[in-house]
Image: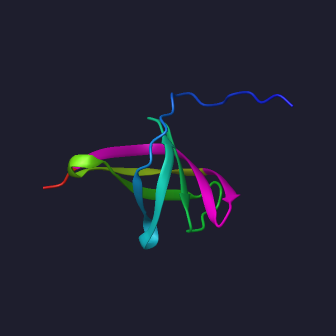
């Protein structure tokens, strides 16, 4: 079976804490300027909106909004693929 790569931006494997809407949490597995893939225990529906905040070192946060592209079972957690529609950097002041 042959799969065609559909990603349009280089992905970086990085584990960042993610704060999700409705007080959920997760952790990224990879990120790019166009999307995020994360693991969480919170349930999401494909094609639904998502709001999340990623925490980087030094107190920098990135507030993101996007659309859930795919949800897959990963053991006891869910893998959530997100296409980002907007993001903005916030300094912790």
Looking at the image, residue 28 sits to the left or right of residue 63; the answer is right
Going by the picture, which residue comes out furthest to the right? 1
Residue in the foreground of this view, choosing between 50 and 61: 61
- The image quadrant that residue 43 belongs to is bottom right
Residue 7 sits inside the magenta stretch: no
Q: Residue 87, image x and y in percent? A: 37, 45
Question: In the displayed structure, would residue 76 be above or below residue 83?
Answer: below
Depth check, front residue: 23 or 17: 17
Give the total number of marks visible in the rendering.
0
Instruction: Give the colour scheme of this rendering.
Output: rainbow
* As drawn, 41 above or below 14: below
In this image, 81 relative to 50: left or right? right
Q: Is residue 54 left or right of residue 38?
A: left
**Quarter of the figure with the N terminus:** top right
46 up-or-down from 76: above or below:
above
Does residue 89 belong to the magenta stretch? yes
Magenta range is 69-90
Q: Residue at x 63, y 54 (%)?
A: 47
Image coordinates of residue 35 in percent, x first then y, are 51, 41
Q: Quadrant of the C terminus?
A: bottom left
Given the current orientation, which residue lies at the most extreme left position? 93
Q: Position of residue 83 (x, y in %)?
A: 54, 44
- Prevailing secondary structure class for the magenta stretch in the rendered image: strand
Residue 92: where, in percent of width, then height? 18, 54
Question: Going 69% across and 56% down the picture, which residue do you hit?
Answer: 72
Residue at horizontal 31%, vertical 48%? 56
């Amino acid at each position: 079976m042959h799969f065609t790569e559909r990603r349009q931006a280089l992905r970086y494997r990085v584990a960042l804490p993610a704060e999700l809407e409705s007080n959920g949490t997760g952790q990224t597995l990879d990120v790019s300027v166009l999307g995020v893939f994360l693991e969480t225990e919170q349930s999401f529906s494909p094609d639904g909106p998502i709001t999340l905040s990623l925490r980087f070192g030094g107190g920098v946060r990135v507030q993101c909004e996007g659309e859930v592209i795919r949800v897959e079972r990963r053991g006891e957690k869910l893998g959530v693929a997100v296409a980002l529609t907007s993001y903005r950097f916030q300094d912790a002041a």
